[in-house]
Image (cartoon, rainbow, N blue to C red):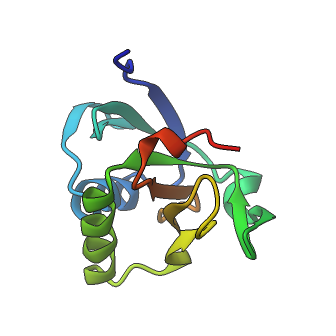
Amino acid sequence: MALSPFHLAIPVHDLPAARKFYGETFGLSEGRSSEQWVDFDFYGHQLVIHEHPPTPSQESAHTNAVDGHDVPVPHFGIVLSWPEWEALAERLKGFGTQFVIEPYVRFKGQPGEQATMFLLDPCGNALEFKAFKDMGQLFAK
C-alpha cells in the first residue's frame, strides 16, 4: 500500500531563519508562501512553517529517556532509506549542525535497530531523522 503524503504545520518565531534552515540546510524546495507562512516539500510531504510566538516546548523541551539518550518531546521527522540517512547526516555535519543526539545506531542487535539523529531548528522545534536497514522492522517489538 502506498503511503499518502502528510501535512504538518509547525510554529516558528523567526520565519526568515526557519525558511533559510529548511531551504538551505536541508535543501527542501519551497511551495506556496505568504508573509506569515512557507510550504516546503519535506521528502514528498507538506511541511508548513507558520510565524507564531515561541511555544513552551520550543523554549524548554521535555525529554524522555530512550536507549540511554534524552529524546526531546515533542519532535517530528521522517524515516529515510539507509543511504539517504547517511547522506543527510553528512550534509548536516557539513553545515556545522549542533545535534541534540548525534547520529548513531539505536537498539543495536535488537528488534527495531535503527539509525537516528536529533536536532533543533532555529526556533527550537525538535526533529528526528531515522532509517532502518530492514524497513520491516519499523514497528518491530
Residue at image location 56% in from the left, 60% down from the top: 113
Vertical arrangement, residue 95 with respect to residue 134, above or below:
below
The answer to whether one can see residue 1 in this image is: yes
Q: Quadrant of residue 48?
A: top left
Residue 104 horizontal/vertical position (percent) = 50, 75
The answer to whether one can see residue 120 in this image is: no
Q: Nearer the viewer, residue 132 or 63?
A: 132
Residue at image location 21% in from the left, 32% down from the top: 31
Location of the N terminus (image quadrant)? top left
Q: Quadrant of residue 43?
A: top left
Vertical arrangement, residue 135 with respect to residue 71, above or below:
above
Residue at image location 47% in from the left, 81% down from the top: 98
Q: What is the number of callouts on the image? A: 0
Residue at image location 33% in from the left, 58% down from the top: 82
Vertical arrangement, residue 131 with respect to residue 49, above or below:
below
Q: Nearer the viewer, residue 137 or 74?
A: 137
Q: Is residue 56 left or right of residue 88?
A: right
Residue 91 horizontal/vertical position (percent) = 25, 72
Q: Is residue 115 left or right of residue 75?
A: left
Q: Nearer the viewer, residue 139 or 90?
A: 139
Residue 61 horizontal/vertical position (percent) = 74, 63
Residue 106 horizontal/vertical position (percent) = 59, 68
Location of the C terminus (image quadrant)? top right
